[in-house]
Image (cartoon, helix red, strand yellow):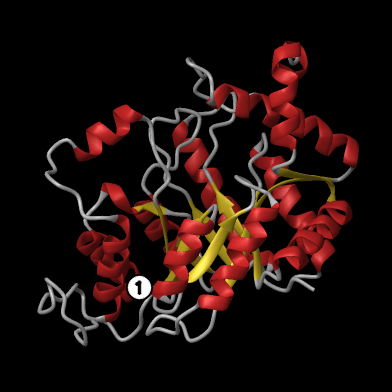
Amino acid sequence: MVTLLNILDYSPIDEGRNARQALLATTKLAKRAEELGYHRFWVAEHHHVLSVAGSSPEMLMMHLATSTKRMRIGSGGVMLPHYSAYKVAENFRMLEALHPNRIDLGIGRSPSYQIVNRALNETKGKRVSYEQQVQDINKFITDDTSEDHRFNSLIATPIIETIPEMWMLGTGMGSAKIAADSGTAYAFAHFAKPSEAAVDAVDHYRKHFKPSRLLDKPKVMIAVFAIIAETAEKAEELAKAFDLWLLFVESDNPPPYYPSVQTANRRGISTIEKDKVMQNRKRMIIGDAEQVRDEIKRVADLYQADEVTIIPNFFGADNRMEGIALLAQAFGLH
């Protein structure tokens, strides 16, 4: 049985709301998640996605860690290729210094829009590889000077007694290999690429994991889109709005908000869009709390996951609050 349940929140800007309201809703959701017994609460990094307010996970994490007391707070994740590994390490050591044993550093390399890549990297010369960046951040987070490193004498400050948990985010074999070689925990994005090959990637990570200063044995988390409501019928209505948001995100001129159920019902789905919607539905778990719980358990068993992270990315702050409460009750969280 899954005993550790987490949340990843994008800070969605619901139709009729603004970014500030979205961030305040995230804060409220995190506080409620802690009361309900969720283990971790992560926030994302999205650039130039106007319907999402979560662009700077480190900044939001500091606010959320201060607004909560016990629950682990993390990034899902920091897109490392855009940044200096040294600066990322310092940001997270600062978070860990102020909130010891509560900070998770989730890193990834998900591609952004080309204009975002240019804006974040236009002053840079030759980039180091992602694999090298992972090695670098590992060194800076753990103060490891045991190996020959080009910055071996460099220390990331503040100097602290604890270290953040480090998670490699990924969708396939490439990230699984890096996580195994680096000795980090591994968070697999089932919501992005559910497939048989995904199970092979997670198996590879476990079989080839190398213990490190970060972690002595493999640890696997899977992340799923979850739409939970009091009834399966209401969940399906919310899913239709989420279907539309996914279509909007991939369009040329997406609106700067999450569409409401009313908007989704009014607009409908074209014949051309139906195939895409059906493909996207494979990425979601939809239903009442018991249905979602049972499907989460099935997927968790498939991967032999240690933890499951839900992404309650559906319309309405009140709907999200209700959904995570219903699921916590179904799982018997405390």
Residue 80 visible in the picture: yes
- Counting from the top left corner in percent of width and height, residue 7 is at 61, 57
Residue at the location (39% across, 36% down)?
A: 112
| Disc 1 element | helix
Query: Does residue 2 appear left or right of residue 68 in this picture?
Result: right
Residue under label 1: 96
In the image, residue 37 above or below residue 44? below
Whether residue 270 appears in this view of the structure is no
Q: Amino acid at mark 1?
A: Glu
Q: Quadrant of the C terminus?
A: bottom right
Question: x%, y% of residue 217?
Answer: 53, 84
The vertical placement of 300 against 287, above or below, is below
Label tally: 1
> Splitting the image into 4 quarters, where does residue 94 fall?
bottom left
Q: Name the foreground residue: 226 vs 306.
A: 306
In the rendered structure, the answer to whether residue 298 lies left or right of residue 13 reads right
Q: Quadrant of residue 220?
A: bottom right
- Which residue corresponds to the image point at 28% horizontal and 67% vertical from the top-left? 137
Quadrant placement of the N terminus: bottom right
Q: Residues within 10 Å of mark 1 (few under 14, many from 20)?
A: many
The percent coordinates of residue 210 (x first, y second) are: 45, 81
Query: Is residue 289 placed above or below 306 in the rendered structure?
Result: above
Question: What residue appears at the point 58 percent right and 62 percent down from the top-left corner?
Answer: 201
Q: Nearer the viewer, residue 156 or 181?
A: 181
| Image x and y of residue 32, in percent | 64, 58
**Nearer to me, 119 or 22:** 119
Residue at 89 percent across and 42 percent down: it is: 231
